[in-house]
Amino acid sequence: MANKDLKYTRNIGIMAHIDAGKTTTTERILFYTGITHKLGETHDGSATMDWMEQEQERGITITSAAVTANWNYNDKTYKINVIDTPGHVDFTVEVERSLRVLDGAIAVFCAVGGVEPQSETVWRQADKYGVPRIGFVNKMDRSGANFYEVVRQIKEMLGANAIPIEIPIGSEENFEGVVDLIQNKAIVWFEDAQLGSRFETREIPESLKEEAKEWRDKLVEAVAETNEELMERYFEDPDSITEDEMMEAIRTATIDRTITPMLCGSAFKNKGVQSLLDAAVTFLPSPLDIPPVKGTNPETDEEESRENSVNAPLSALAFKIATDPFVGRLAFIRVYSGKIDAGSYVKNPRTGKKERISRLYQMKSNKQIPQESIGAGDIGAGVGFKDIRTGDTLCDEKHPITLESINFPEPVIGVA
Ligand code: GDP
């Protein structure tokens, strides 16, 4: 993979408290990106495949530590590595491990339950690792759903600058779409008996025009506040700020974590997931947006860093060891610099030994795809390790480095 492709790579996690809809949202993401993969198209959303059939086929990969999907947006194909982020509070250590290797996250909230103690825990962990986020208020079809209330809670309870970039059209059983505040248009979703889940772009409904304008003004103001030049222009003429400028400013502010863009939908009813994917590739960072990874040279004890480039010496982190019924023991790896080739030797500074990686894979829609090489910024899984643990670094023998690992707390046993 060349460096330029990194611009179109996203390593993202989906985080949520239990029951908010993380699994359903992940399944739908894999479903829509699977369609892209098979039919090579996205936005008319034609799904000729039966949802349940695909879901069954994919049972294994949904629970995989990282799944690679493609998404087409604005004539570009993005590669999205979806990293599994355990949502339950008991798995705090695992959550931290996955937060270490992802570059951005989708935080899923329930439109009825809003911010719950567990969402707070996961949110704080993401803050600790500086993970940029977009928010998805799910279950908008449920009775009692309230997008604005959840946005308020995220501001007040989590201290985030949560800013709607869309607002719902209808709610509960009448929830039918959103007003996209950036593009100033309505998006309405519907099921077509033959073609499956589809959506249509329309004029903003008359009854919502005023409300949409108010929220758009708030969005433009929030965007202007992140950027001095835009602020000056905003005071002169708020309408002079173009759609592209807004997108760029929101992207920068999301990566700086000064804004959390908020979207809504109902994953279960196939409403809003395509817009969520568009927002994820638009606003969440690529591996090029994150600083070079740091570590320690185990021979000199000096701090070193590695450029996000395939041409730099290899540095990679094993973040999950799993057993797969088809390929055996798999080590999921995030490559930060350089590349790993199938059949090559890499050094593990913890053991001081070289290991031969016999095969490399990426998990795609419903199968493991063998890879010749996995480059900087990408995620995959390797087979053939004799001794590997979660948190181990893999590096170039001539340029050894131990990447900063999370200090995983030892489990506390027997304390009252
Ligand atoms: P997780 O625990 O966060 O992974 O949540 P799940 O995806 O398993 O969802 C929990 C429950 O909520 C399941 O019964 C889902 O069918 C249901 N659910 C998920 N998304 C929606 C939604 O958009 N609307 C409604 N009404 N139910 C949903």
Image (spheres, rainbow, N blue to C red):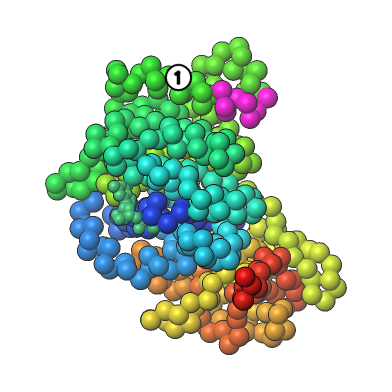
Instruction: Tell how many labels.
Output: 1
Residue at point 32% right, 68% down? 59
Residue 276 shown left or right of residue 244 in the figure? left
Residue topped by disc 1: 214
Residue 211 shown left or right of residue 396 in the figure? left
Residue 274 versus residue 233 in the image, above or below? below
Residue 86 versus residue 227 in the image, above or below? below
The one nearer the camera, 167 or 4, is 167
Magenta span main SS = helix
Q: Quadrant of the C terminus?
A: bottom right
Residue at point 20% right, 58% down? 50
Q: Is residue 208 magenta?
A: no
Query: Amino acid under label 1?
Result: Glu
Q: Is residue 254 visible?
A: no
Residue 150 versus residue 364 in the image, above or below? above
Quadrant of residue 339 within the rendered picture: bottom right
The one nearer the camera, 302 or 41, is 302
Which contiguous range is marked in magenta? 221-228
Residue 203 shown left or right of residue 295 in the figure? left
